[in-house]
Amino acid sequence: MLSSNNKTTLSRARVLKTLLLSATLISTGTSNALAKTGDTTIHFAKGAVSSVVTGKLKPNEDERWYRFNASAAQYAIINIAPLAGTPETANVGVLYMPNGKYDGTKGGVIYQGCLPATGEYRLRIARNLMATHGKTAGYKAEVMILPKYASKALCENN
């Protein structure tokens, strides 16, 4: 049997572990919330339905965030391609939607369909950590969003 002194020490150790875990989770949540302030806005020229962004992730960077506004029932296609002249490709894309859902995949067309909600969308472009060699990873992402009138026939059943 443990003495009362040992029980107190074990109890304090558990409390300390719980506090450290809580602090870690809170700081992780805070850094994710703050990441939004570092997003790059995707601008569409007047009358344009698409915009292209290019970038390079340095060897110590894993991801880059973009944002744009769109309306529910607009048809969108997001494509990620290699950037010429870079030794690696940041080919992972995930679209985070205003309603809390997300969708994405590795390379090529990472999203195609009718947008589910009106508001701010966030696009995360990242390197595939399983296939990286720690070099600069480039990308060229095209975001195409059709206007509502052009999306109507494509999205009317959604």
Image: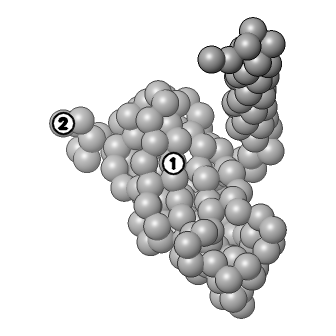
Q: Classify mark 1: residues with Cα within 10 Å, few (<14), some (14-19) or many (20+).
A: many
**Quarter of the figure that contains the N terminus:** top right
**Mark 1 and mark 2 residues within 8 Å of each other at the beta carbon:** no
Task: Kindly give the residue lying farthest to the top in the view shown.
Answer: 4
The circle on residue 157 is 2
Separation (CA) of disc 1 from disc 2: 22 Å
Asked whether 28 or 41 is in front, the reply is: 28
Query: Mark 2 belongs to which amino acid?
Result: Asn
Rendering coords of residue 100 (x, y %): 49, 30
Rendering coords of residue 59 (x, y %): 79, 74
In this picture, residue 75 sits left or right of residue 61: left
Query: Mark 1 belongs to which amino acid?
Result: Leu
Looking at the rendered image, the disc whose residue lies closer to the viewer, 1 or 2, is 1
In this picture, residue 6 sits left or right of residue 91: right
Asked if 98 appears above or below 19 in the picture, the reply is below
Q: Which residue is mark 1?
A: 95
Asked whether 137 or 27 is in front, the reply is: 27
Rendering coords of residue 71 (x, y %): 47, 33
Count of residue discs: 2
Q: In terms of secondary structure, where does tag 1 sit?
A: strand
In this picture, residue 138 sits left or right of residue 78: right
**Quarter of the figure that contains the C terminus:** top left
